[in-house]
């Protein structure tokens, strides 16, 4: 572990150049039972400024001091954590925050000399995964993910980690990852925990990467279901493909930068004299995240191919419907032709009969003995002529 630096007295002055410092540090929180994730959040008085702040942000999830891999103190507030750390010359502080207030981050920044840009990133959240070093402090941004079975979607969280010579600060935005399990695992392995803040960082990285495995399995099941729905002709499948594709874009943004970050950490093994056990640990994490990143890339390509196939099937279905509609229209036209032809044929004798049926005394053929046969022959001749004309034109 790196040599401890001299700790300042509790901060009272405003740090120069900070654009986000708008409220003073919060007062020490009262002791209260742990929450479901191991939290020890204070319960402020209803109606107080602290209660209003708690309505929009949580406070300290859990803080602990360790020496030689063993927990020696469990402070219930940031002020107690600072005081206990000053009293433990060989100790390491591990502070967990969930959606902290600005005043809490400002207090941590002044106590541990955190860089203003890193603090501003932790306040704003919505950062891309990255790894930056500010003096003796390493600032890491991670994107965690979890698969929600009920809505069949991926939920992303954001985690900011400050790693110094004798402290680890985690700032969590979102439900994932479960750092309580990471803390429990490390406390059950004191030989690993006594390696210092670097060991805690690698354990957090491992937890984030391991959390990707259920997401990969869930997405694989979704893709299998989508393939079945595509060939069934489900009209809602296009929307599901689009939504899952957007989630894979976010998943890719979370995993791809992490590969480079881990390789950057491995490149600094010799420079920062990293323990051999931690080196093996980090290489294993790097292998897992590389495998996950490749799977995510494969998912994006598979979804692109499925979308293309779905578009082709939809086009084929539309063409088939248009062809069936055209055939129906053609058949209808043929029927109309037949009806029109027979109507014209039947209209001819009706016309002749109507003319000879008029009651006029001076009609030319009225007294003609051959008038009736002539009218019949005329009707027959007209009908036969029309029949052959329509037959030649394939109307009949």
Image (cartoon, rainbow, N blue to C red):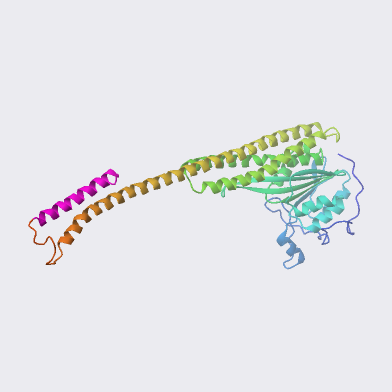
Does any portion of residue 322 appear in the rendered image?
A: yes
Q: Report the label total.
A: 0
As drawn, 18 above or below 213: below
Rendering coords of residue 78 (x, y %)? 81, 54
Residue furthest to the right in view is 6
Name the foreground residue: 363 vs 256.
363
Residue under the image location 65 percent in, 44 percent down: 249
Decide if residue 288 is on the left or right side of residue 311.
right
- Whether 372 is among the magenta residues is yes
Does the segment drawn in magenta span residue 304? no
Which span is picked out in magenta?
Answer: 370-396
Q: Is residue 307 left or right of residue 94?
A: left
Is residue 225 something one can see in this rendering?
A: no
x and y percentages locating residue 125 in the rendered image: 74, 52
Where in the figure is residue 370, as x and y percent of width and height?
Answer: 9, 55
How far from the left and from the top, in percent, is residue 234? 48, 46
The answer to whether 358 is drawn above or below residue 267 in the figure is: below
Q: In the image shown, does 368 or 69 lie closer to the viewer?
A: 368
Q: Residue at image x 52%, y 43%?
A: 311
The answer to which of 17 and 327 lies nearer the viewer is 327
List the single residue furthest toward the bottom.
47
Q: Residue at x 87, y 47 (%)?
A: 88
**Residue under the image location 33 percent in, 47 percent down:** 331
Prevailing SS of the magenta stretch = helix
Please identify the quadrant where the N terminus is shown.
Answer: top right
């Amino acid at each position: 572990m790196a040599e401890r630096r001299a700790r300042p007295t509790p901060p009272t002055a405003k740090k120069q150049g900070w654009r986000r410092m708008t409220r003073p540090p919060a007062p020490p929180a009262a002791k209260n039972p742990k929450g479901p994730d191991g939290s020890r959040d204070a319960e402020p008085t209803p109606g107080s400024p602290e209660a209003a702040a708690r309505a929009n942000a949580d406070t300290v999830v859990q803080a602990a001091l360790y020496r030689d891999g063993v927990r020696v103190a469990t402070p219930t507030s940031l002020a107690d954590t600072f005081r206990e750390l000053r009293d433990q010359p060989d100790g390491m502080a591990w502070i967990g925050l969930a959606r902290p207030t600005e005043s809490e981050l400002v207090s941590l920044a002044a106590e541990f000399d955190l860089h203003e840009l890193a603090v501003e990133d932790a306040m704003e959240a919505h950062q891309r995964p990255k790894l930056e070093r500010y003096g003796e402090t390493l600032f890491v941004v991670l994107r965690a993910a979890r698969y929600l079975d009920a809505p069949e979607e991926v939920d992303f969280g954001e985690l900011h980690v400050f790693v110094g010579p004798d402290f680890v600060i985690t700032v969590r935005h979102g439900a994932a990852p479960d750092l309580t399990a990471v803390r429990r695992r490390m406390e059950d392995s004191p030989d690993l925990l006594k390696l210092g803040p670097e060991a805690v960082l690698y354990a957090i990285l491992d937890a984030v990467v391991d959390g990707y495995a259920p997401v990969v399995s869930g997405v694989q099941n979704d893709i299998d279901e989508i393939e079945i729905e595509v060939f069934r002709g489900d009209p809602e499948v296009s929307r599901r493909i689009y939504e899952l594709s957007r989630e894979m874009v976010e998943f890719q943004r979370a995993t791809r930068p992490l590969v480079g970050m881990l390789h950057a950490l491995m490149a600094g093994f010799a420079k920062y004299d990293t323990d051999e056990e931690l080196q093996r640990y980090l290489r294993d994490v790097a292998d897992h995240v590389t495998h996950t990143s490749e799977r995510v890339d494969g998912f994006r390509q598979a979804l692109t191919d499925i979308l293309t196939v779905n578009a082709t099937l939809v086009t084929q279905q539309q063409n088939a419907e248009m062809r069936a509609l055209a055939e129906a229209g053609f058949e209808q036209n043929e029927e109309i032709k037949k009806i029109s032809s027979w109507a014209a044929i039947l209209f001819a004798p009706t016309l002749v009969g109507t003319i000879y049926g008029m009651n006029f005394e001076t009609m030319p053929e009225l007294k003609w003995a051959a008038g009736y046969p002539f009218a019949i022959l005329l009707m027959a001749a007209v009908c036969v002529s029309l029949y052959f004309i329509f037959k030649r034109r394939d109307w009949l």
